[in-house]
Image: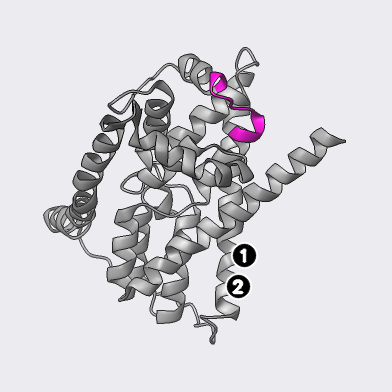
């Protein structure tokens, strides 16, 4: 879980140390419930704009930090809940004992550690990322730049997804961005901004005030921000993580389950929150 905060794919690889095949699968499938490093910038940006934007001084950073911390705690809670459900259903079995054995003390071999880290972990993860990142980048560019009746393909897709996205308290562009962000979570916000600004390339804006103005002008509310943060936490992992789960677990069925578990949880939770907000508005 701790490695997953840096990268979910690296967290999945870290599950190799678990002896029990059943518990290893549970750990791999639930690793995606904690936000990786690619999701934190988006979470921090939304928290800063919508929950700490009207507060001046040092309290602004505190409110933003606490908001993101609540999202992280939600991810940890979901990890524990789903782990328990999996261990009682499709992956039930006898829990293995935990033995911590101290290895003999040896002088660290720096060269061997660096080589193993680079080749066995870093290049492995980067190689799987490149398999999807390059084709996906081309697809995003094509969708943003091919127009039919003066409307680009991204807008057609967003309009098609919009009714379902509204049920979740989102909009079609947000949901489209999450789908197109499958190669990497870092590009979800740039895709959202690209769609809103009708730009042909990914938009990278560092000023949170400017980003906030664009989001609010396109209909974002506090409910939109809350549900987007939840869906950022609870949605399908990136393609690199899915490919890593497929390799480590030995089949696409486990990668599909890792795709479906957080996504279903995110859809259900966002739908409930959006429904409660609608009831609050009515009464």
The residue labelled by disc 2 is 85
Can you say whether 54 is above or below 181 in the image? above
Q: Are marks 2 and 1 in contact (CB under 8 Å)?
A: yes
Q: Residue at x 80, y 33 (%)?
A: 281
Q: Nearer the viewer, residue 191 or 172?
A: 172
Q: Which numbered circle lies on residue 81?
A: 1
Residue 98 is inside the magenta segment: no
Q: Secondary structure at mark 1?
A: helix
Q: Which numbered circle lies on residue 93?
A: none
Where are the magenta residues, as a range? Answer: 216-225
Chief secondary structure of the magenta span?
Answer: helix
Determine whether, in the image, residue 221 is placed left or right of residue 252: right
Work out which residue is located at the far top of the displayed protein and give it. 56
Q: Residue at x 26, y 33 (%)?
A: 146
Residue 215 in percent (x, y) is at 52, 23
Image quadrant of residue 274? top right
Q: Secondary structure at mark 2?
A: helix
Q: Residue at x 29, y 37 (%)?
A: 143
Q: Residue at x 34, y 57 (%)?
A: 241
Image quadrant of residue 144? top left
Determine whether, in the image, residue 251 is placed left or right of residue 128: right
Determine whether, in the image, residue 173 is placed left or right of residue 67: left
Residue 253 in percent (x, y) is at 38, 74
Residue 99 in percent (x, y) is at 45, 78
Residue 16 in percent (x, y) is at 33, 70
Q: Is residue 211 visible?
A: yes
Work out which residue is located at the far front of the displayed protein and give it. 149
Q: Nearer the viewer, residue 112 or 188?
A: 188
């Amino acid at each position: 879980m701790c490695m997953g905060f840096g990268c979910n794919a690296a967290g999945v690889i870290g599950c190799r140390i678990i002896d029990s095949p059943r518990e290893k699968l549970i750990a791999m499938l639930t690793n995606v419930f904690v936000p990786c490093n690619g999701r934190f910038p988006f979470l921090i940006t939304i928290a800063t704009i919508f929950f700490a934007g009207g507060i001046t001084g040092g309290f602004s950073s505190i409110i933003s930090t606490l908001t993101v911390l609540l999202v992280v705690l939600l991810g940890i809670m979901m990890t524990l809940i789903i782990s328990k459900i999996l261990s009682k259903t499709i992956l039930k079995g006898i829990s293995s004992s935990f033995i911590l054995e101290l290895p003999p003390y040896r002088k660290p071999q720096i060269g061997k550690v660096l080589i193993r880290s680079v080749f066995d972990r870093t290049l492995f993860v980067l190689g799987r990322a490149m398999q999807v990142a390059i084709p996906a980048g081309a697809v995003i560019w094509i969708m943003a730049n091919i127009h039919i009746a003066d409307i680009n393909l991204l807008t057609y897709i967003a309009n098609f997804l919009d009714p379902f996205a509204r049920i979740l308290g989102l909009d079609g562009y947000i949901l489209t961005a999450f789908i197109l962000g499958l190669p990497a979570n870092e590009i979800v916000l740039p895709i959202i901004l690209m769609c809103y600004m009708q730009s042909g390339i990914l938009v990278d804006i560092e000023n949170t005030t400017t980003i906030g103005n664009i989001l609010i002008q396109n209909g974002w509310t506090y409910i939109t921000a809350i549900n987007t943060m939840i869906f950022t936490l609870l949605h399908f992992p990136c393609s690199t993580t899915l490919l890593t789960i497929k390799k480590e677990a030995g089949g696409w069925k486990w990668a599909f389950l890792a795709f479906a578990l957080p996504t279903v949880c995110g859809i259900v939770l966002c739908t409930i929150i959006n429904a409660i907000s609608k009831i609050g508005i009515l009464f």
